[in-house]
Image (tube, grey):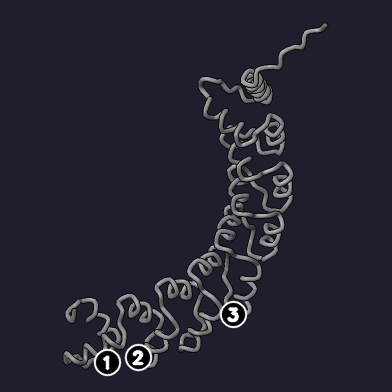
Amino acid sequence: MPVARPSADPQEAKQSGGADYIQKMRDAGYPLDLNKDLDTLVSMRSIGVTPEYAKAMAGVGLGTPAPRDLISLKAVGVTPEYVAELRSSGIPPTTFREVISERSLGITPEYAKSVSAMGMGSPTVHDLVSLKSQGITPEYLATLRAAGINPKDLHELTSLKAVGVTPEFAKGMTDAGYPNLSTHDLVSLRAQGVTPEYARWLKQTFHDADTHTLRQASVFHVDADFVAKAKAHGFDNASIDKLVKLKMTGLLD
């Protein structure tokens, strides 16, 4: 009667599979050493980097990815198909680092094409990453343009979104007595915390207050309370410039 062959020890089978994985990764162009590269091997295998995946990524036209790139690529779900679509979108990535950044932010080939179609020069991958990280869409640009806000380039567009400039903010500033503000003015005023309400108060109180004065008054917190305090101390000069200087000195603090 034939004697049944004992089943292979699970640990032995696991070790055999591991050795096979190391050899196949070497065949794929990654001469990893079990002693020197143990952490890398553990990370690659645990994240699901296979020899087939390594070969496929090396064939997308961006060179041979380093082991750390393979780990990051696999971790964020990059596939050869995704890279191919990005490269045909009109804004092709040139490195695996760029691909990883795009995938991490959820940049799709469709988004890249829509940015190219906005008519704002020739966007780079860096531009795409900046725009996407700020949540900028072609629709956002369209609402700005409809309100008469025309950023001259992607840098201005990103700045507008970053500080929270909206068509409503621009209209509020116009209604407050500050029409036709440049993109630079809108960005700097919004970044300094100027509101249409404050701008309206300043313009009504000091009719000659221009944009420069508005910035200064806002920075030094010249408001109705300070004006009243200055008058209470006998300061009756109606010049906003003088009030700003008075606030700067801290004499009434």
Picture residue at 46% right of the left edge, 89% below the top: 177
Residue with the most extreme right position: 1
| SS at circle 1 | loop
Residue 26 seen anywhere in this rendered image of the structure:
no
Give 6 or 247, whichever is nearer the viewer: 6
Q: Earlier in the sequence, mark 1 or mark 3?
A: 3
Of the numbered discs 2 and 1, the one sitting upstream in the chain is 2
Q: Residue at x 46, y 88 (%)?
A: 176
- Give the SS element for disc 3: loop
Across and down, in percent, residue 50 comes to 67, 31
Assign the C terminus to one quadrant of the image. Answer: bottom left
User: Residue 36: in sight, yes or no?
Assistant: yes
Q: Is residue 127 above or below residue 142?
A: above
Q: Are marks 2 and 1 in contact (CB under 8 Å)?
A: yes
Quadrant of res 8: top right
Inter-mark Cα distance, 2 to 3: 27 Å
User: As drawn, is 91 to the left or to the right of 97?
Assistant: right
Circle 3: residue type: Gly
Residue 81 placed where, x, y %? Answer: 74, 44
Q: What label sits on residue 148 in the rendered view? A: 3
Left or right of residue 39: residue 193: left
Residue on which disc 1 sits? 238
Q: Position of residue 90 (x, y in %)?
A: 71, 53
- Which residue is under mark 2? 206
Question: How far is the residue under mark 1 from the one under mark 3?
Answer: 34 Å
Q: Amino acid at mark 1?
A: Ala
Residue at coordinates 45% horizontally, 84% vertically from top-left?
196
What's the mark number on residue 57?
Answer: none
Q: Nearer the viewer, residue 40 or 253?
A: 40
Q: Earlier in the sequence, mark 2 or mark 3?
A: 3
Q: For the point 50% across and 76% down, which residue is it? A: 182
The relative height of residue 89 versus residue 10 in the rendered view (above or below) is below
